[in-house]
Structures are given as C-alpha cells and as structure tokens.
Image: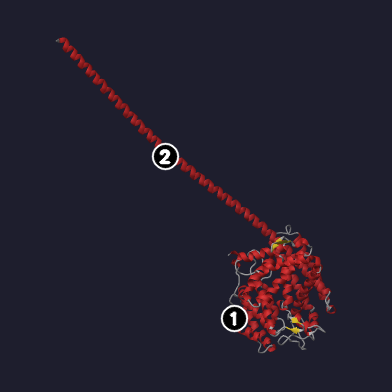
Amino acid sequence: MKLAEFKKHKKDVESWQQEGLVAVSQRRLHDVQSQHNLLQQVHQSRREEINQHVQKLKESHSESVKRQDAALKEFEKQRQQLKEEKEKRELEMEQKVADIKALAKSIGDAKTSLLAILDGCQHKQYLTEAAEKTKLLMRRLAEQADHLAGNAHKSGPLDDILHRLKDIQEQSQNAMDHSANAESAISVQATQGQGTAAGSGQRATSASQDVPAGQEGALAAVFLEYEQNKKLLADVDAKLQPFIGNQQMKKLRFDLQRAVNTPINAISPVSSAHLRDKLQRLRALLQGQTVEVSGKRVNPQDVPEGVLFCKNLVAKMIARKAEEQVSSSHESAFAIAAVAVGLWAEFPDVGKLLMCHLQALCPYVLPFMPPRLPQQSSADYHKSLGYNVEDGTIEPQDKYLRRMSGIMRLYAAILITAPPQGANHPHPHGIECAWIWLSRTLNLKPDPDITATAIFDMLQVTGNFLLRAYRVQFVKLLHALCKLFLPKLKEVAAGSGPVSRLETFLETTMRNSAMIPQPEGYLPPQFWYS
C-alpha cells in the first residue's frame, strides 16, 4: 500500500518536474524569441537609418556633382566668353589696322590721281602756283599717312591713329577742293562756249554754259573727280585688254562671266539667307577662290588678270541692274544695294569701280554734266550725258530720264543700306555722301529735267535718313532748295513735268516739318539677322 502510494507520489513529482522543465523551457524560449524579435527590430531600425543615411549621401553626392558640373559649365562659359572677347578684340584690331591701311591707300591714291590729272590736264596752261602748292601739300599728307599706317602698332592707340588719318584724309580732300577753287579757270575755260542739253532726246543747243560767280570752284572739284574716275576706268580697261583679246582665254572668260552673272541676276530680298548666299558666292570669287557654277569649277587666279576682270565685271553688272531693273522696279534697288555695300565694305576697289561705271552711265551721280567739247558731234555729246545713241538716233527723253532715275535710286539706296558685316563696320559710302551730293547740286547750274529728276530721287530715297543725321541743317537745305534753287529750275524748264513733281514733293515735305517716309523696299540693318 505504502509502496504504491510512494510510486504514485514519485510519478506525480516526476510529472511536476517535467511540467516545470517544460514551463521553464517555454519561458526561456519566449524570452529568447522576444530578445530575437527585439534584435530584429533594432537591426531593422539600424538598416533603415543606414539606408536613409546612404540615400542622403547619394543625394548629397548627386547635388555635389550637379554643382560641380554647373561650376565647370560656368567656368567653360566664362572661358569661352573670354576667348570670344579676345578674338573679337583681335578682329577689331585687325579691322582697324585694315581701315588704317585703306585710309592711307585712299590718301595715296588721291595724291596719285591729283598729280596725274594736274600734270596731264588738257588745260595745263591755266595752272598757277596754287596747283604746285597743292601738289606739295598732297605729297606731305600722303607721307604722313604712310608713316602712320606703317607704324600703327607703335604710334599709339589704333582709334587715335584712325582719327588722325581721317583728319589727314579730310585735309587731302580740302586740298583738292582748294586746288579746284584756285584753278577754276580750267573747267571754266573748258565749259565756255559749250552748249547744254535741252529738249526731248535731241537737245543740242548753241547756248553758252556760263558758270555763275562763286560756283566755279564747286564745278572744278566735281570735274576733277569726274576725270579721276574716267582715268581709272581707262586704266582698268587697258590692263584687261590682253586677257579680253586673247581668244585662247575665251572659255575661261565665259566661265568667269557666268560666275559673276549667276548670283547677281539672282539677287532678291526673299530672305537674308538668300542674299548672304549670293554675297558669299561673289565674295569667294573676288577673293580668288575656286567656285562652282553650273557644275563647273573655275578659279579667277588661273590668269593674272582674273580677279581684276571679276571685280570690274561685278561693278559693271551692278551698275547695269540700275538702268535695266531699278528703273522699272524701284523697290529692287535695296537688295542690289545690300550686296553692293557688302562687297564695297570688303573690297574698296570694287566700290570705286562701281562709282566709275555708274558715272559712265549717269554722270549726275557726282553730280556733273560734261561740257560739250569743240568739234564734238551731237551724238557723242549726248553719249557723254548718258543718252543711248543707236545709228545716230538719240534716245527719247522719257526713256533717258527713266534710266537715269533707276541709276540715281540705286546710288541713293547704297548710301542708306547698312553693311552686312554689322554696326561695328563703317559704311564705305554712307549718308554723308547724300549731303555732299545735294550740296554740290545746289552749287551747280541747273539743267532741265535731269536735275529735277535726280534731286527728287535722292530726296525720296535718303530724305528720312538725312533728317535723322543732320536735323536742322537738313531743314535749312530743303528751304534753300525751295526758295533759291527751285526758281532757277523753273527759269530753265518752265512747265517741265519733273520740275512740277519736285515742287509738289518739296511743298508737301515742308508742310510735314521735313518728314519724309522711308522708301518702299528699304532693308533695315536687322534684315541681315532675320
């Protein structure tokens, strides 16, 4: 009995022990599990913190890289700007040096031309001591110009040298004008007893072209320029004659003519890109580069006279566009003028040749009306005035005036059209030449029809710009035209259509406070950047 109870008690104790061990194990397992869960939470929290920290580091690195990239880009931009500014300064310096050399050459050419004209003048017997003084003055001015041009980088700031050279150029021009005034007997003698053109296409007259007192100097100054241009054109023709007369060069001449005519005939204001293309084609040709035309490649430097041939032909073709195209389409003058100014700015000799060819077609671009020479036929005299003469038949007056109007309008358009090279590039023949032209015209004896036509065209094209440039002085000039010059025109051309048109234009302009609208078709400076 007791043994059985003992065994049962023992069994219960063992059961209790087993249950206690299980309970302890479960508690320990629970504690371990809790600690494990806690550690996992801690680890998870640390991982999240680490991930957040890593993300922040990545973002910080990305921002740092962006800042560095931006700093590098800004540095590169500043470096490029400095480089461009340096290149711009170098280009400006090169341009100023080129302008200095061009001015010096212009002064030298003026000296050479003046000496040649005075020494070879057909009225040399009228020269006095004043002419010799002018020669000495021109030689001295040319020497000063050569010295400044030869020592441009040593003589001080280039702007100062440019101003000094412009002063010398002005002095040289004054010297020529003073010489013209002093030697007015040359042109006066040349004009005494000569007739002037009058009537409808056949205006031969026996009236003497007397020069009023005080106007001889102005006439003589224009006469000198007229003779200079004639001589230059004759010299160029003489230099080109061996090439033009060589039959073996016929194919090359034809190719060069096409290389000139193709872009010139395609000139139109359709877009700035279109005009730049035509300008670039002509520029490349005049620079002596190989160009392609109609699938063929041609280089003007294949012969010594090639570049001069092209320059002369470009000037001649542009002048012809004036009488053939501008005469019937006034607006077309400005696209042609844009190309002409672009070439003139880069090739001054092309501009000079253009003036020579314009003068040959219409001497009133100076303005100058050649006197009738002794024994000169009516046909030859009218040719010198710009009339077309075929088989002895002189061109009708209306056709003559229409052609002269086209030439004057192209010349006037050139004076107000900005160079495509930009505002920093000086205009080779700007608005000041319109003022000179009008001043000269006021000092010359009026000629029927053509004088009124030329003044009207010049004012209608350049008047808006003359008012901006000269303001009150331009108003005074218009007043002088109305009160002093117009009555003289009426005296020699009563009832003339061109004179009546000019009178109406001047009256309207004065009523509008000298305001003249911009001409139709005008291409503003920003056209080149559109």
Label pair 2/1, CB-CB below 8 angstroms: no
Dividing the picture into quarters, in which one does residue 288 lie? bottom right
- 10 Å crowding of disc 1: few (<14), some (14-19), many (20+): some
With 442 as the anchor, is 227 left or right in this view? right
Q: If the image is split into quadrants, where does the C terminus sit? A: bottom right
- In x, y percent, where is residue 57? 46, 40
**Numbered circle sitting on residue 264:** none
Which residue of the protein is positioned furthest toward the left in this rendering?
1
With 209 as the anchor, is 522 left or right in this view? left
**Numbered circle sitting on residue 509:** 1
> Amino acid type of disc 2?
Gln
Q: Nearer the viewer, residue 389 or 424?
A: 389
Q: Is residue 11 above or below residue 335?
A: above
Rounded to the nearest angstrom, the CA distance separating label 2 from label 1 is 81 Å
- In x, y percent, where is residue 196? 75, 85
**Numbered circle sitting on residue 52:** 2
Q: If the image is split into quadrants, where does the N terminus sit? A: top left
> Amino acid type of disc 1?
Thr
With 46 as the anchor, is 420 left or right in this view? right
Q: Is residue 304 above or below residue 514?
A: above
Q: Nearer the viewer, residue 283 or 415?
A: 283
Which SS class for mark 1? helix
**Of callouts 2 and 1, which one flags the residue occurring earlier in the amino acid sequence?**
2
> What residue is at 74 percent from the left and 69 percent from the top?
312
Which SS class for mark 2? helix
Whether residue 504 is visible, yes or no, is yes
